[in-house]
Amino acid sequence: MSMVSIERDEDVAVVRYDRGGKANALNLAAIDALIDAAGELARDDRVRAVVLTGTPAVFSAGIDLKDPALWNHDDPLMTQRALARGEALCRAWSELPQVTIAAIEGAAVGGGAVLALACDWRVLGADAFLRLPEVRLGLPLAWGGLPRLASLVGPARAKRALFTDLRLDADTAEDWGLADDIAPTGEVLRTATDLAREAAACPPLALRLTKRAIDAQFDANAYAHAQTDQFLLCHLLSPATGV
């Protein structure tokens, strides 16, 4: 069974990511599968809005710290190349021409939260939350997550979220501008799909051109590669990460 599936219903697509366990953490195989899904949808002119979701219990616990394909102890260059796939993942989803919505049940932590930030909108379940524990673990926020977070919540709140490992529950996320809607637990996918259908009602050319124009005004990811390299450097310098 594939970890990533795409279901199309007229002009809306739902992408489901399910590893079948391991808190839906992002290993290299999952990262590549999600990049492939984004590439497939980018070429689909019929789809106007895309919903990305995890399992009914968890969106994603972040990067898989135990995946040997990501962490090569003998060759840092191979690790750097593998980690750069996470940066490519978030770029692929942020650059989709369609409107994108992350439908989040349960936890979206670390790289999982960064992937959600790469989408245009986020719908959280009442019991869902975001966490960005990287700095507390001795690692900078990578994959382009830092400028996306700061652009959404401002510099002071970005520092608060990162330096205190703040658990951003649904209400706080909405208040800070990280959540665009809150749905009852179990109803997140339906709510996100309804929102996707509202966006899909726009004429496709106007929708795509307007999304691209708005994103161009706030594009701060020219240095996303540096964040990923800093992540790797801190990992190499600190055995405390346990990787």
Image (spheres, rainbow, N blue to C red):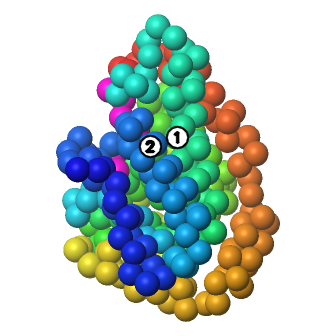
Magenta stretch secondary structure, dominant: loop
User: Who is closer to the viewer here, 187 or 184?
Assistant: 187
* Whether label 2 touches label 1, CB < 8 Å: yes
Residue at 50% across / 89% down in the picture? 198
User: Who is closer to the viewer here, 213 or 159?
Assistant: 213
- Judging by the rendered image, the residue that carries numbered circle 1 is 86
Give amino acid for label 2. Ile
Residue 218 image-quadrant placement: bottom right
SS state under label 2:
helix
Residue at 66% across / 51% down in the picture? 147
Residue 81 rendering spot, x and y as whole percentages: 57, 27
Q: Name the mark on residue 31.
A: 2
Q: Badge 2: few (under 14), some or many (20 or more) residues near its Cα, within 10 Å? A: many
Q: Is residue 97 visible?
A: yes
Earlier along the polypeptide chain: callout 2 or callout 1?
2
Residues at marks 2 and 1, CA–CA distance in whole angstroms: 6 Å
Residue 168 rendering spot, x and y as whole percentages: 41, 59
Picture layout, residue 87 above or below residue 46: above
Relative to 45, is 21 on the left or the right? left
Give amino acid for label 1. Gly
SS state under label 1:
helix
Q: Name the mark on residue 20.
A: none
Which residue occupies the extreme top position in the image? Answer: 74
Residue 101 rendering spot, x and y as whole percentages: 48, 70
Region of the chain picked out in magenta, as a range = 59-66
Q: Is residue 158 visible?
A: no
Relative to 18, is 222 on the left or the right? right
Residue 64: say if magenta.
Answer: yes
